[in-house]
Amino acid sequence: MSRRPSRFLLGGRRFSPAASLALAAPFLLLLLVVFLLPLATLLHESLFVPEPGIGNYARALQEPVYLRVMLRTLRIALFVTLLALLLAWPLALLMARSKGLGLALLAAAVLLPLWTSVLVRTYAWMVLLQRNGVVNQMLAQLGLSDQPMRLLYTEGAVVLAMAHVLLPFMVLPIYSALKGIPEDYSRAAQMLGASPWASFREVTWPLCLPGVTSGCLMVFLLALGFFVTPALIGGPQQMMIATLVSQQVREMLDWPFAGALVGILLFFVLMLTLLFRRAVRLDRFVGQA
């Protein structure tokens, strides 16, 4: 018995695989031209310029200055993820328990920063944290500091500003997971004698874990390649790998070495994504079996 080719449903209409591919062709062509082709060219140069081999990669992994930049990038990305999680969890829980106007206001507070340029938000943090900025003036008025503190161009400032910029990418997955948990589950657990902490630990947390892990992965990966905020808030002292790549391309004109840095970062991102898929079964988030 012959099987009919599978068809895809979109907007109430069914499309054959060929028609679906034709509809996706413009996006796939754009992806090929503006992302895959330049990336492949850069990786090719990293392996074959000035001569075939892994010399550029060995240089990146052997010289201490570049290793410090890579380790700093991983450390900052980890701290940003943890801080974003601590800030996002209560907000997502409040959104999940709110309705009507309250939910609309909270959602606007989360989504509105996404409509503002990252550069603008970064400059706002520079105004707040500079030597004569709002934070130092407030500390002086409260009598907590006799002289301006050095807040700008520090690793803490970079972590704080990046966590603020990336916070929506943590809030939304957690809110989606919490919204899908029926309130009867926690109520039933407490009726059976569980304390609020036990109800959270045994019911709420396991059910919202996919949203938490998804948000953490998204924020961590975005933080690894962040450029504008670390460059302005951290300066040369807090250089991350994206800033280093930009320096190699614009100032040193060393495209092969920049390609090696990109290749190392890409390898780490792919490995992390595969580990995440293996650990929590990423297909649950897209509705696949």
Image (tube, rainbow, N blue to C red):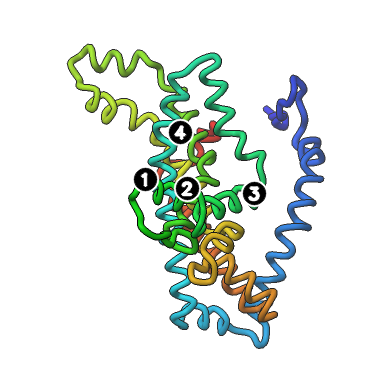
Residue 161, given in percent of the width and then of the height, sits at: 51, 51
**Numbered tag placed on residue 217 in the rendering:** 2
Residue 248 shows up from this direction: yes
> Mark 1 belongs to which amino acid?
Leu
Residue corresponding to mark 3: 120
Residue corresponding to mark 4: 174
Q: Is residue 287 above or below residue 37?
A: above
N-terminal of the pair, mark 3 or mark 4, is 3
> Mark 4 belongs to which amino acid?
Ile
Position of residue 37 in the picture relative to residue 214 (left or right): right
N-terminal of the pair, mark 2 or mark 4, is 4
Residue 173, given in percent of the width and then of the height, sits at: 50, 35
Measured in 3D between alpha carbons, the distance from the residue under mark 1 to the one under mark 2, in whole angstroms, is 39 Å
Residue at 43 percent across and 19 percent down: it is 97
Residue at 44 percent across and 81 percent down: it is 64
N-terminal of the pair, mark 1 or mark 2, is 1
